[in-house]
């Protein structure tokens, strides 16, 4: 397996042990650890309830991240969106590819390849990438607001590689 060094510095504070990337504190855990915790919560409260909780938390987190990254790197407009998806892809969640983006209209299509959840779950014939869904609405809303557009969005996963006959996942973002 070949690889490359991500274009993001990781700084470890010698006194606190806190890892920081792009001026934000980070956690570094093995994929199986994170996904097994995710699966455990899903087993206890159900995938639908967990998806609702994660949507709201993910929306808020993506909005905040995009806001802080825009400030940190002097990014504007669609560049914030593209930077966000690039960073997600560099952090092992999967590869997020923007197939369509119209910030003013509040629409986007995102293709997901190599999902960390699909790697762990396998083919279970259901959508397992729901953790990401709120991320796209939160990111697009932050970008739109930064440009003065009044649009607010919602996102939905329309396809998952864990479903039979599917090799990739898709997410659609549309105005509320």
Image (cartoon, grey):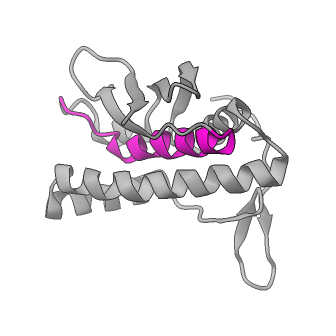
Magenta segment includes 88? no
Magenta segment includes 144? yes
Residue 124 placement (x, y as % from top left): 19, 33
Q: Residue at x 19, y 56 (%)?
A: 49
Q: Which residue is drawn at 51% across and 35% down?
A: 94
Q: Residue at x 37, y 41 (%)?
A: 117
User: Magenta region: which residues?
Assistant: 125-148
The quadrant in which the C terminus is found is top left
Left or right, 51 with reference to 116: left
Nearer to me, 92 or 109 = 109
Res. 154 image quadrant: top left
Residue 39 placement (x, y as % from top left): 26, 55
Left or right, 140 with reference to 37: right
Residue 19 placement (x, y as % from top left): 71, 68
- Count all numbered tags in the image, as a single digit: 0
Left or right, 88 with reference to 74: left
The quadrant in which the N terminus is found is top right
Nearer to me, 120 or 44 = 44
């Amino acid at each position: 397996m070949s690889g490359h060094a991500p274009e993001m510095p990781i700084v470890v504070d010698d006194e606190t042990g806190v890892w920081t990337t792009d001026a934000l504190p980070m956690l570094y855990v093995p994929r199986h650890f994170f996904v097994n915790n995710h699966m455990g919560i899903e087993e206890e409260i159900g995938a639908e309830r967990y998806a609702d909780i994660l949507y709201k938390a993910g929306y808020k987190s993506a909005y905040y991240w995009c806001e802080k990254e825009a400030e940190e790197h002097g990014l504007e407009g669609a560049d914030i969106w593209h930077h966000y998806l690039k960073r997600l892809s560099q952090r092992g969640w999967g590869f997020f590819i923007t197939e369509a983006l119209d910030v003013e209209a509040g629409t986007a299509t995102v293709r997901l390849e190599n999902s960390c959840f699909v790697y762990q779950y396998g083919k279970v014939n259901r959508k397992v990438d729901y953790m990401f869904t709120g991320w796209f609405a939160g990111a697009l809303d932050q970008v739109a607001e930064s440009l003065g557009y009044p649009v607010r969005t919602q996102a939905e996963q329309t396809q998952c590689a864990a479903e039979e006959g599917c090799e990739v996942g898709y997410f659609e973002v549309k105005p509320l």
